[in-house]
Amino acid sequence: MTTTVAAPATTAPVAKAKAARPWTQHGMLFIAPFLVVYVAFLVWPLLLGLQMSLSSVNIAGSNDGFVGFANYAEAFGDPRMWRSLWNTVLFTVLSTVPLVILGLVFALLVHNLRFMRWLWRLSFFAPFLLPSAVVAVLWRQMIYQPGFGLLNGTLGTDSLWLGDPNMAMWSVVMTTVWWTVGFNFLLYLAALQSIPEQLYEAASIDGASAWDKLRSITLPMLRRTTGLVVVLQLLASLKVFDQIYLMTGGGPEDSTRPIIEYAYDIGFTGYRVGYASAVSYILFILIVAVSLVQLRLLRKREESLR
């Protein structure tokens, strides 16, 4: 009588693991170019900037060595740093609200149109495709020009839109809204097109009005998109630099200078790269904190809806 010995139960999993190992190696080969670029242009500069923020290195190459948190202590006691940080927060608040609301309103308008919808899509999204330099020159030279600008000519005034400390920030915000609202508009429009029409048909059968449909169907279905738009807009506004630098240079009287421009001026005009790196990391910590709080709020909202 022949006795058959069963193979160990672990043979099959080991064989599967060995068979899967070449695929893992091939996957690493595919992602290797991305990892090289990611480390070279993100991880390494991040670590190098942190090292610089703890030293007194300047753009001329001289370095007095490790200074610890002295740059951070100086930054927290610097009134110009706090002024630039306040300008950044103010710009974020003033721009985020209209960019989210107008993006939703424009998307609702285009979604409900029945004629020449493509033209309205192009009209709302086209400014977002313009480079920041073009936008800055267009608004500064043709719209905000004190003598013969389009805005003063239309209103019959001679206001210094970019030269008045009380109006400069509002002027930059208005330009930014015109320029970037198209991105939020596109996100909302895509979300609106994904809402099933059956929901609106069932609501119409029940006698719901247009306002009832908006309040009970459209806005709840857009909740996730709104959360995404708010997060992206907050991050983009906190990193504002281009349009302000090109339109006002941070003036007048530092009334529009964001913290990124202040770090730029300190590093490349004042040659204090170490101190500029510390200021940049303060902004980095602020952005991370805002992102974590926003994601936490979105998670709680998702859990409450389940």
Image (cartoon, rainbow, N blue to C red):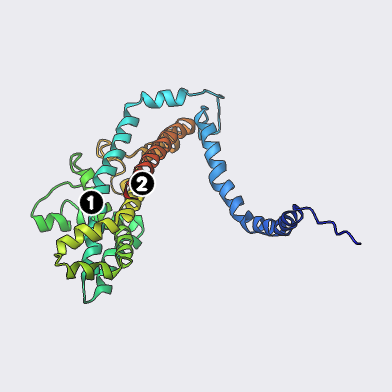
Give the residue drawn at x 31%, y 46%.
244
- Identify the element where label 1 is drawn: helix
Instruction: Name which residue lies at 55% across and 37% down.
Output: 47
Q: Amino acid at mark 2?
A: Glu
Residue at the extreme front of the image, as rendered = 1
Residue, disc 1: 98
Q: How many marks?
A: 2
**Label 2 secondary element:** helix
Q: Nearer the viewer, mark 2 or mark 1?
A: 2
Residue 188 locus on image (x, y percent): 30, 60
Residue 253 vs residue 299: left or right?
A: left
**Residue 240 visible in the displayed image:** no
Question: Which picture quadrant has residue 139?
Answer: bottom left
Q: Could you tell me if residue 252 is visible in this image?
A: yes
Name which of mark 2 and mark 1 comes first in the sequence.
1
Give residue 115's mark: none
The extreme bottom residue here reads: 115
What residue type is disc 1 on? Pro
> Which residue is label 2 attached to?
303
Residue 237: where, in percent of width, then height?
A: 33, 46
Question: How many residues crowd mark 1 within 10 Å: few (<14), some (14–19), many (20+)?
Answer: some
Q: Nearer the viewer, residue 279 or 97?
A: 97
Q: Position of residue 191 (x, y in %)?
A: 32, 62
**Which residue extends farthest left?**
156
Quadrant housing residue 178: bottom left
Q: Nearer the viewer, residue 299 or 244?
A: 299
Q: Residue at x 29, y 35 (%)?
A: 86
Q: Quadrant of the N terminus?
A: bottom right
How far, Cα to Cα, is label 2 from label 1?
28 Å
Question: In the picture shown, does residue 243 fall above or below 201?
Answer: above
Residue 248 picture location, percent across and down: 28, 45
